[in-house]
Amino acid sequence: MFFHFKKATKVNFREEKFNYNSGDKVLLLVSYKSDQIKMENLLDRTGFLIRAFYTNPDKSYGLILCQPIRY
């Protein structure tokens, strides 16, 4: 899922400033069918730290809260 900017926008987040132009897009989420171990490995390899991993009882759905390791 992406967020598309319709006009130039400046965003201040913590100590960082981000400038977006009309037409720019930001990736908000990725839906991926996998199992918990594969997802943990994928996030680890791509530089994310898992803060929480929630699944329903039969583990057919999951929600992962993560953050980039550099923050």
Image: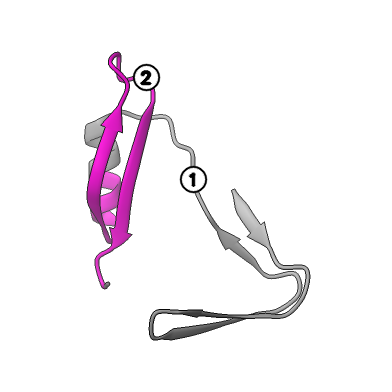
Image x and y of residue 20, in percent? 64, 78
Q: Amino acid at mark 2?
A: Ser
SS for tag 1? loop
Tell me which residue sits at (42%, 30%) in the image: 33
- Dot label at residue 30: 1
Residue hosting label 2: 60
Is 40 placed above or below 68 here?
above
- Choose between 2 and 12: the one closer to the eye: 12
Amino acid under disc 1: Val
Q: Where does the image place residue 15, in percent across and percent down from the top left?
A: 38, 86
Look at the numbered disc 2 and give the secondary structure of its residue: loop
Determine whether 45 is above or below 24 in the image.
Answer: above
For marks 1 and 2, give the CA distance: 16 Å
- Which circle's residue, 1 or 2, is located before the other in the chain? 1
Mark 1 nearby-residue class (10 Å; few <14, some 14–19, many ≥20):
few
Residue at position x 27%, y 72% in the image: 71
Please state the extent of the stretch shown in magenta in the rendering: 41-70
